[in-house]
Amino acid sequence: MATPRFLGKVEDDTAILEGEEAKHANVKRIKTGEIIEINDLKGNVYLCKVRSVSKKKIEAEILEKLPTDSFQPKVEITLYLAIPNRPAKVDELIEPLSQLGVSKLVPVLISRTALKKKDVEKKLEKWRKIALNSIKQCKRLYPLSVEEPIGLLDITPSGDLKVFFYEREREKTLKDLCKKNLNVKSADVIIGNEGGFTKEEATVLVQKGFEPYSLGNLILTMETAVIAGISQLNLALS
């Protein structure tokens, strides 16, 4: 059974859980003497032994600092996601995106987005909270960064690889990347919402350096396309 992990702060030889994390630990019935892991959100993870438990605060003795290299994504992936007209769909995507190692999520408003920028901005706090909680399960060091929403024309990709999943692309798939000996440390990916991108938007993305790829002959929902696309990209770059 995996050792439970929490987010806390470290003072000298003591790790401390407070607020929501202390509440979460109590819900999980963490007891004195139990072994837990503490992520200080500064790139460090500690193996600890619980010293005291109360409703508002839990203190633990630090036993050792754990190696963390294996929990760092090999490729820094920025996902530019065209926001769906039901933004709650993004709520359900944050956790799998965290598990798949996406570093940054940038909400994008395109022509087929019915929401306004202010509507998306209202969701950012919730998405960031989900991202923070998600790292405890998948044992990432840092949470997925959820950025401010932007328009399609404002995208400024900087990755070594720029991928654009497009339903009108019929030939190129990510299998083609597997055949290349790529030295990629960062990748920018953009995925559309319901209805996908217009031809004009596709042209803009190509002009910005994105290469169109297909996810297959079937039409996928946005949620399926996101998970399939990121999974395939991880495989192609592994």
Image: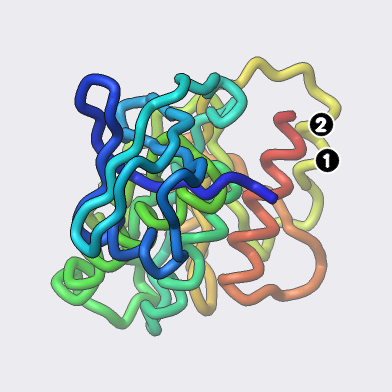
Near-viewer residue (158 or 61): 61
Q: In which quarter of the image is residue 103?
A: top left
The residue under label 1 is 175
Q: In this view, does 67 lie to the left or right of 25?
A: right
Near-viewer residue (83 or 19): 19
Inter-mark Cα distance, 1 to 2: 5 Å
**Can residue 153 be seen?**
no
Q: Which amino acid does label 1 sit on?
A: Lys
* Other-residue count near label 1 (Cα within 10 Å), few / some / many at <14 / 14–19 / ≥20: few
Q: Against 30, is 50 above or below? A: above
The residue under label 2 is 178
Please, what secondary structure does the residue beneath circle 1 have? helix
**Can residue 194 be seen?**
yes
Q: Position of residue 213 (x, y in %)?
A: 68, 49
At x 76% / y 32%, what residue is drawn? 177
* Other-residue count near label 2 (Cα within 10 Å), few / some / many at <14 / 14–19 / ≥20: some
Near-viewer residue (66 or 192): 66
Q: Dots 1 and 2: beta carbons under 8 Å?
A: yes
Q: Where is residue 107 in the image (x, y as percent from the top left)?
A: 34, 59
The quarter of the image holding the C terminus is top right
Q: In which quarter of the image is residue 129?
A: bottom left
Q: Position of residue 12 (x, y in %)?
A: 22, 20
Q: In which quarter of the image is residue 51?
A: top left
